[in-house]
Image (spheres, rainbow, N blue to C red):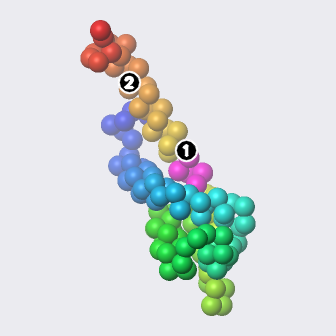
């Protein structure tokens, strides 16, 4: 897939998800959810040195990026990783990185700077 043909919506999705994953706490939350599916927010709080409000803010970012979803369970929120979204993100990253590598290789094979000495 050529970079100029990589759909703008996919680029926006990559930026949103990379932005959500740019925080180590949010990455840790995903790791916890992978190890303990269907965790409630208080389970996450118990495993992190953060307040409930801070964990909820991080979950909100992950949810807006489409990486997690939750369902109310009475007064609790049960959280999951959205596996379909994670798989689509993985495929988009591979497609985008392949397009970058292909374009770079083509540019260098044509001898364009900075590939020439």
- Image coordinates of residue 28 in percent, x first then y, are 59, 60
Q: Nearer the viewer, residue 49 or 97?
A: 49
Q: x, y percentage for residue 36? A: 72, 66
Residue bearing mark 1: 91
Q: Secondary structure at mark 1?
A: helix
- Where residue 44 appears, as percent x and y from the top left, is 63, 72
Give residue 104's quadrant in the image: top left
Indicate which disc, 2 or 1, sits on the residue closer to the N terminus. Answer: 1
Mark 2: few/some/many CA within 10 Å (<14, 14-19, 20+): some
Q: Between tags 2 and 1, which lies in front?
A: 2
Is 66 left, or right, of 81 in this rendering?
A: left
Residue contact at pointers 2 and 1, CB within 8 angstroms: no
Q: Which mark is residue 104?
A: 2
Q: Check the image and report above or below for 5 versus 102.
A: below
Res. 13 in view: no
Q: How many marks?
A: 2
Secondary element at tag 2? helix
Image height of 82 relative to 86, above or below: below
């Amino acid at each position: 897939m050529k970079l100029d043909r990589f759909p703008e919506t996919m680029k926006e999705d990559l930026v949103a998800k990379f932005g959500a994953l740019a925080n180590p706490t949010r990455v840790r939350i995903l790791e916890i959810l992978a190890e303990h599916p269907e965790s409630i927010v208080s389970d996450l709080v118990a495993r992190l040195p953060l307040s409930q409000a801070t964990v909820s803010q991080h979950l909100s970012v992950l949810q807006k990026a489409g990486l997690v979803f939750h369902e109310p369970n009475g007064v609790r929120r049960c959280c999951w990783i959205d596996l379909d979204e994670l798989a689509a993100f993985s495929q988009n990253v591979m497609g985008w990185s392949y397009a970058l590598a292909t374009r770079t290789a083509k540019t260098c094979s044509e001898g364009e700077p900075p590939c020439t000495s």
